[in-house]
Image (cartoon, rainbow, N blue to C red):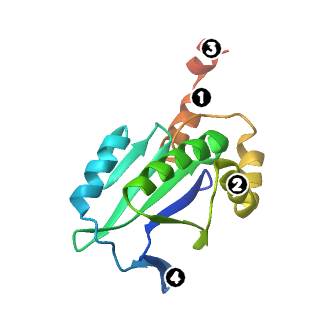
Amino acid sequence: MGMESYNIMLLAHNVSIVKKHEYWGLSNYSDMSENTIKKAINQLCDCSMKENEYVFKDIIDVKVYCENNYFQGIETRGCISCLEEGIKRFYELYYKMNEIIPIHVYVLDQRIDIHNENELYDTICNLYSDKINLFKRQYGDEELIVSSGGFYNEINKRKKWYYKIFHK
């Protein structure tokens, strides 16, 4: 995860985050099959980037985790440049996924309860406050509606001389 992004995990109820040396991992898995969850994700997401990786509503990168062909959870990554819009779209994904399988939300390895998107936005801003401030000092307040994976491509494109001429 780079300077431009924040992560939110959606884990099946019986799955938890465990520390494995300096990395994290997931323990246990749900009773929902990998194929069932992938069908649901394919219907919700815009495109598939690689196996188990998708994009939701153009700006939320989604990675599905499974073990033994059963669903464990979803890692989502949004871009700080469009934090407010990203939280709205994440909450939509959370709501739809929670209709398919009961899930818990984790931010920075902490389980959080969310009741609405404003509460989630405030939580993300609080937990990622240092990173958000650093990001704004580096890139300013301009809102780019892009995924975290597409952020640096967009920044590089905007630095080109011809972009500056045609997009004033």
Name which of mark 1 and mark 3 comes first in the sequence: 1
What's the distance in space between the residues labelled 3 and 4, CA to CA? 47 Å
Residue for badge 3: 165
Q: Amino acid at mark 3?
A: Ile
Decide which of tag 3 and tag 4 comes sooner along the chain. 4
**Nearer the camera: disc 2 or disc 1:** 2
Mark 4 — residue? 22
Give the alpha-carbon distance from disc 2 to disc 1, as whole Å.
33 Å
Residue 102 in picture, x, y percent from top left = 43, 64
**Mark sitting earlier along the chain (2/1):** 2
Residue 145 sits in quarter: top right
* SS label for mark 1: helix
Callout 4 touching callout 1 (CB < 8 Å): no
Q: Residues within 10 Å of mark 1 (few under 14, many from 20)?
A: few
**Chain-order first, disc 2 or disc 4:** 4
Say left or right for 32 vs 83: left
Q: Where in the figure is residue 47, as x and y percent of width and height?
A: 33, 39
- Name the mark nearer the viewer: 2 or 4: 2
Identify the secondary structure beneath mark 3.
Answer: helix
Q: Nearer the viewer, residue 27 or 25?
A: 27
- Where does label 2 land, which residue? 119
